[in-house]
Amino acid sequence: MTRRPTDYAVIGGGVLGCLAAREILARDPGAGVVVLERDAVGSGASRRSAGLHFPRGSSPRVREMAAYSQRWYAAAKAARPELPVHGLGMTVLAPVAAGAELRRAYLPEAGLRPAAGVPAPLDRLPGGMSAWEGDGCQYADVHALTQLLARDLRRTAKFHEGAEVTGVHPGADGVRLELGTGGDLSAGHVVLAPGPWLSAPAWKDLVAPLGARVKRVVALHIEVPPAPGDGAVVFQDEDAFLLPYHERGHWLFSYTCDEWDVDPDSLTPGVSAADRSDALATLGRYAPHLVEHCLSGRVFCDAYAPDREPIVRALTGDGRVVFAGAANGSGYRLAPAVAAQAAGLLPLPSQRKDAA
């Protein structure tokens, strides 16, 4: 059985997929939008995301995306104070001579300035290191935020959870999607936001030319309650950070795990002894008193682009299938900008009518 056509289908019910659906409807309120999720909404990388946003970017495009997303989250929080998005102070640790480099990487809104002392919960700064305070940092319960986004979207969009897409077949008149639940769904255009599931058979060949890879992501839970007012600590050169989870009552330490080409469906969820050892090699230099409290954590994976910039690109010559993702561990941080760029590649309502 083939379901009636819809204007847009979004594959992936994480924070990015939900924001893409929201962006489409903001630009075309009368559109038919369906969100397809192989599991439950927000159950993949969004459920395990640290949810940290800090105002920086490794390139002009990423800085522009970070600024856009920061404005989006600030406006959303102002309009709906109940959103699980929480402002934080921020301290950046970097070599003493790195001030000019930091100011190039961080947005002007960060207002970087020398810190007065060693930030909590650190014991010390190693020789040659300096600390810089900044603004514009926040973190979110990404799973809870995704649930709220989906709840709002259900008023104007359809959701199919537990409906795996097993085939993506672009054609002259639209895109036919095969569903694991049986039957097909026909859509005019598709936004593919699969998170780390790049190798799913339905779109593996479509995304292969993008060159994106999947990397394992590990974070330790530090079972020490943060004090009121404690902020995030960003280790610039180590590409790591400490995040005070005030609502959960513990700290999180995310570090760079260099394990590539992993299968998200085959990951062991627990933190290994090797993971802990790698993480503590960095953390122990700054906060040796925390080492004994690092006995747990979270493991998942994310998609990374070859140039470390999120990929937003049409996968077919006619633009009917658009990929949005490979945000390099910054899916939450850059999701509003990625969603906006993906929607920008879709036809405007007048263009869709002209093509009909």
Image (tube, rainbow, N blue to C red):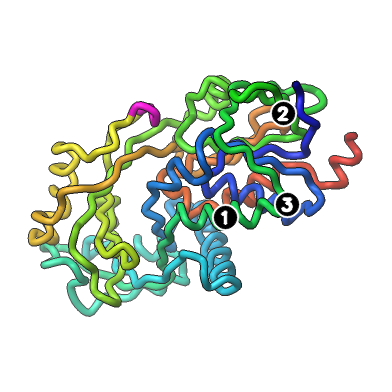
Residue 93, percent across and down?
25, 63
In which quadrant is the C terminus drawn?
Answer: top right
Q: CA distance from mark 1 to mark 2?
A: 27 Å
Which secondary structure lies at badge 2? Answer: strand
What amino acid is labelled 2 in the image? Leu
Segment colored magenta: 261-266
Residue 336: image tag: 1
Mark 1 vs 3, N-terminal side: 3
Residue 224, percent across and down?
18, 63
Residue tagged 2: 185
What amino acid is labelled 1 in the image? Pro
Residue 268, percent across and down?
28, 32
Is 265 magenta? The answer is yes
Mark 2 vs 3, N-terminal side: 3
Residue at the location (53% across, 53% down)? Answer: 147
Which secondary structure lies at badge 1? Answer: helix
Q: Residues within 10 Å of mark 1 (few under 14, many from 20)?
A: many
